[in-house]
Image (cartoon, rainbow, N blue to C red):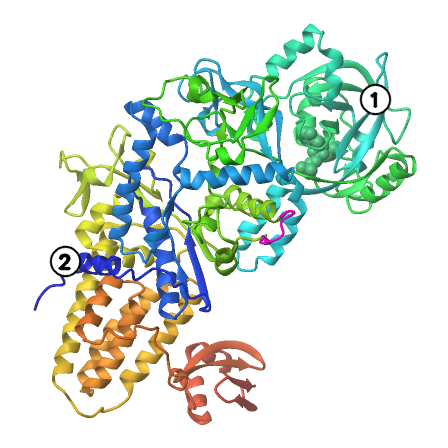
Amino acid sequence: MTRYNFKEIEQKWQDFWEENKTFQTSTDKSKEKFYCLEMFPYPSGKIHMGHVRNYTIGDVLARFKKLQGFNVLHPMGWDSFGMPAENAAKQNNLNPKQWTEENISNMKRQLKKLGLSIDWDREISTCSPEYYKHQQEFFLELYDKGLVYRKEQYVNWDPVDQTVLANEQVIDGKGWRSGHPVERKKLNQWFFNITKFSNELLESLDTLDEWPNKVKIMQKNWIGKSFGCEVSFKIISSKPIEEIKCFTTRPDTLFGSSFLALSIDHPLSKYYEENKDFLDFKNRCSNTGTTEEAIANAEKIGFKTDLIAINPLDKNIKIPVYFANFVLMDYGLGAVFGCPAHDQRDLDFAKKYNLKILPVVTPKLEEDLVINDKAYTGPGYIFNSDFLDGLKSPSESILKTIEFLEKENLGEKKINFRLKDWGISRQRYWGCPIPIIYDENNNPKKVPKEMLPVLLPEIKKLDETGNPLDRISDWKNIKINNNNFKRETDTLDTFVDSSWYFLRFCSPKNNNYGFSQEDVDYWMPVDQYIGGVEHAILHLLYSRFFMNALSFKSKNFNLKEPFKGLFTQGMVCHETYKDNNDNWLSPDEIEVINGKKVLKSDNSKLIKVGPSESMSKSKKNTIDPENIINNFGADSVRLFILSDSPPEKDVQWSEEGISASYKFIQKLWVLNNKFHEEINKKYLKDQDDELIKFTSKFIYKLENNLKNFSYNIIIANMHEAHSALNKILLKKYKFSTLIENYKKILIAISIIIPHFSSECIDQLEDSQDLRWPQYNKSLIEEDETNIVIQINGKKRNILNFKKDTKEDDIFEQIIKDKVIVKYLVDKKIKKKIYVKNKLMNIII
Ligand code: ANZ
């Protein structure tokens, strides 16, 4: 018997699909559409197992929908701008464009080997001018709508490399390359006004019922709607300062406030700019990074002013005013009142500067509370607070305080969002140029539309420091109508590139605009989007914002939510290995001898096996998909990556697992040969209908498991089918029955192992009409049923019976059941109540 030659067969079908453009979308827009999209990859050079999993999950769905008769859009592209290209170019002394293009062509070749049902005619790449030209148009469109602006903001500045660092390039407060402490520096930067849509972005999350709850919660927290109040503190000072306003969510703790704190960028800082101590303090603050996390973890430090603030609830309480490093200028009003007993940061600060710590909320009514090292932030009752004493906190006390403040004109209700505007400027070369020029007075102007795209100038080699665009003077300086301009040298954050790419896939070749409205009306929203949960916040929120921004003041475009369904898949994990010196080892460096894992290079050395963790280069526990495809075939890889765990959970990669999948395909091939032997016997009559019943049930199960992404169960269904069919086949079915049913089964499993199935369907010489098979409802009724057994109305067990078993037979069995017997010892059975096929209640 011939073995299944996966190499030849997989290549044959991949060529066939490509030649026949099998996965091209139809131009017939009266057909029902299905848009299936997986997050597009960054072209780092090689695909990794995470890609394999992501794209296999999407491919199963896309193939299923296509077989069901939908017009399926299943495209692929490249998120090809970004820092790794620059870093690689610097390290290897080459050009980022060339590096990126080579990576794309290699990864495309690798993806094709997986047998994905992709319409490659729609391929896009964000670093190509045909793509980013439209992005520049969108930028200007948003600029005209007032959704783009420029302001000064802090960046991480590496003084040695003279460059701005991304947050992830700051490691322990130092530049990743120079190792020099990072400084905070203010730069003029471009922003998208995402906060204009804070409320819309929050509220419309409730309409996304095909999104995982956890992602919606993460977005909710990120947008962070806070209900609070703005409180005014009157100020005593020799300076012309009358009041300071703070935003607080806890006005009910005002009696416990012992200081006011301002951000170093608060407008009042102008009164201290001549003060040497203040400037020193400001300098010390600039040594922390710019992330919220870095600021939160930094030691709390302050600068005491000569201002005195009056508590708005009681004129007699006066507190000092500080500048403090933990107050952010871009949240609330850049000023807070500190209540050390009930806020940890305030407590740390108060201890350092010897400020009063007065608790005002106690967990137990009429009991005092002592604060040591931990602030109390829980609920309770107000005390030490005059007219608020005894109120439930926070439910009653906040409203009561706001009522008082509003009456006295010292405060008002206020809603705040944590969400900040999206800073889109990057001081980098390898990104989409921002289509802005500056006149001789440094006023920004739009690049005229007819001059788009602003092409990224080609450079041969990247230098170590700074932004190269700054130094290419014949690109940077331009003349329009005899006026001199300088180009903006910042490029766009790559998250902008991925905020609208799904629109481009609808009309990838449209020349005069980013998409054609007609195409977008037909294809959008994406029916099923699939990707990693690491993009739960930024990418998904930015894409939702971008749709809001395009819809804003637009006559034609009205699409707020780009992704109807979202699925987030789990990680691919692998055991980790270390040698005796605790150096990581890769799985390639290890072999198993007599059941023990040893070094390949020196069999006498045992290695240490660590826990399974998600595959990462740093722990060397990665497996190269291409090697695996070459050794086991794409179908085996697809089969294995879907088996064992549900797609939303992590999956463990193992050598044993992939070889088991390979063997299973060989076993299916043996079964295939048996089918042909039986078919060739040309029996003329069926003995029974077991095969027909089996086929219907199998298809029914697959459909159900597809609905809720239980792809791992589908693989289990395939294993069951293999053993069941081996038995059923012995029953001498008519050849046409065999062909008809086997074809249905093959079509159904073609979504998982498409090469194998296509080959087998081809052998049946009946490749016409490849549609998802229908099942016969009357045949899928279960023959068995679970019956609940109650004693005196209490559920005590559930037992399985053949449907419609006689009541007496059921009873006979129940009284012998191990669990039930215990309840019946020495008891008299008074009565039994039976509900057919469902329940038996025994009254004792
Ligand atoms: C007084 C207070 C007492 C506060 C207390 C909390 C607990 P969320 O929930 O995130 O909105 N805050 C306000 N503006 C700030 C800024 N610019 N930088 C740093 N912190 C700021 O947080 C609101 C709370 O964060 C506010 O309520 C304020 O501290 C602080 F027992 O005011 B609270």
Apparent side of residue 116 relative to residue 263 in the rendered image (left or right) = left
> Hey, which residue is sitting farthest front in the picture?
481
**What residue is shown at x 48% (from left), y 44% (from top)?**
535
Q: State left or right for residue 844 relative to residue 93.
A: right
Q: Quadrant of residue 8?
A: bottom left
Q: Which residue is mark 1?
A: 309
Q: Which residues are magenta?
A: 552-559
Label 1 SS: strand
Label 1: how many Cα within 10 Å (few below 14, some 14–19, many 20+) = many
- Residue shown at 90% from the left, 29% from the top: 314
Q: Is residue 743 magenta?
A: no
Q: Which residue is found at the position 24% from the left and 67% from the top?
A: 757
Whether residue 419 can be seen here = no
Image height of 373 relative to 682, above or below: above
Residue 143 or residue 574, whichever sits in front: 143
In the rendered view of the protein, which quadrant contains the C terminus?
bottom right
The disc placed on residue 121 is: none
**Kind of residue sitting beneath label 1:** Ala
- Taking depth in this image into account, of 79 and 806 the one nearest to the observer is 79
Counting from the top left corner in percent of width and height, residue 5 is at: 13, 60
Q: Residue furthest left?
A: 1
Relative to 827, is 55 on the left or the right? left
Residue 361: percent from left, percent from top? 78, 38
Residues under labels 2 and 1: Cα distance? 82 Å
Q: Quadrant of ligand 1?
A: top right
Residue located beneath label 2 in the image: 8
Q: Amino acid at mark 2?
A: Glu
Instruction: Label 2: state its secondary structure.
Output: helix
